[in-house]
Amino acid sequence: MIGADGALYAIRRPLFVEPGTDTILDDMAIPMGVVRAQRRVVMELGARAHEQGSETAREEFARKSRVIAGAVQFLTRRDSSVPLHSGQVIVSLISHKALRWFSPGFATCAFLSSVTLSSASHGYALAASAQAVLMALGLAGCVPRLRRLGIVAIAHYFCLVQVAAVVGLLRGLTGRQTVLWKRFDRMATQHPVGAAR
């Protein structure tokens, strides 16, 4: 693995390298430090945790854009270089991270290509129409009442993630993402049975 859930991971003390105080995404920086030491970061299937996810689109947008900005910051810093000794790390970075971060660019190219070629082929016209409908449904999801419809909710989430990726990339490249993260107010909830308080 090339990252960990910041709320739930353990590390051997000798392998811990404290990240800089300006590090946005320490749950990527710390595990990558382990990989740079030529040790493995592995998933423990028996580990369990309970976490309350984002409750609003605004919270999810802030979380997604912050994570991507932090990853971009990590990859562009001299003191957090990617360990090139492992082909698996490079493949994981590209397939699990970079392709997602650049998906808005891929989606934009696909839409513009479909629109450009729509007059030459019914297939491209259909693809352009489908993509336009997806974006329209995504915008419709800005209305909470409409977001109750499953297809609108899915389209809205897809579009939200794409825009968050663009914002995160720009903030990461320009250094405009704050290190601090906003703790959103939560209603009091019961702890799951057996959960630590």
Image (tube, rainbow, N blue to C red):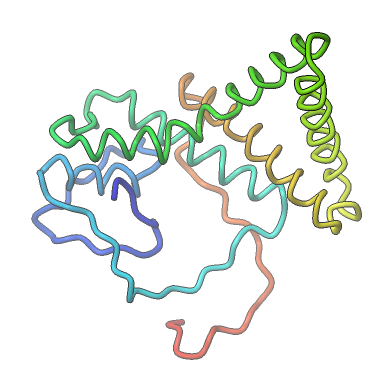
Please name the residue shown 80% across and 57% down the image: 150
Please name the residue shown 46% across and 21% down the image: 173
Residue ranking furthest to the bottom: 193
Residue 135 image-quadrant placement: top right
Residue 129 image-quadrant placement: top right
Left/right of residue 24 with respect to residue 181 in the rendered view: left
Residue 137 point in image, percent of width and height: 84, 40
- Of residue 145 and residue 90, the one placed in the foreground of this image is 90
- Number of callouts: 0
- Of residue 190 and residue 48, the one placed in the foreground of this image is 48
Residue 39 point in image, percent of width and height: 12, 50
Left/right of residue 182 with respect to residue 39 in the rendered view: right
Please name the residue shown 8% across and 55% down the image: 14
Residue 85 point in image, percent of width and height: 13, 33
Left/right of residue 194 with respect to residue 11 in the rendered view: right
- Of residue 61 and residue 24, the one placed in the foreground of this image is 61
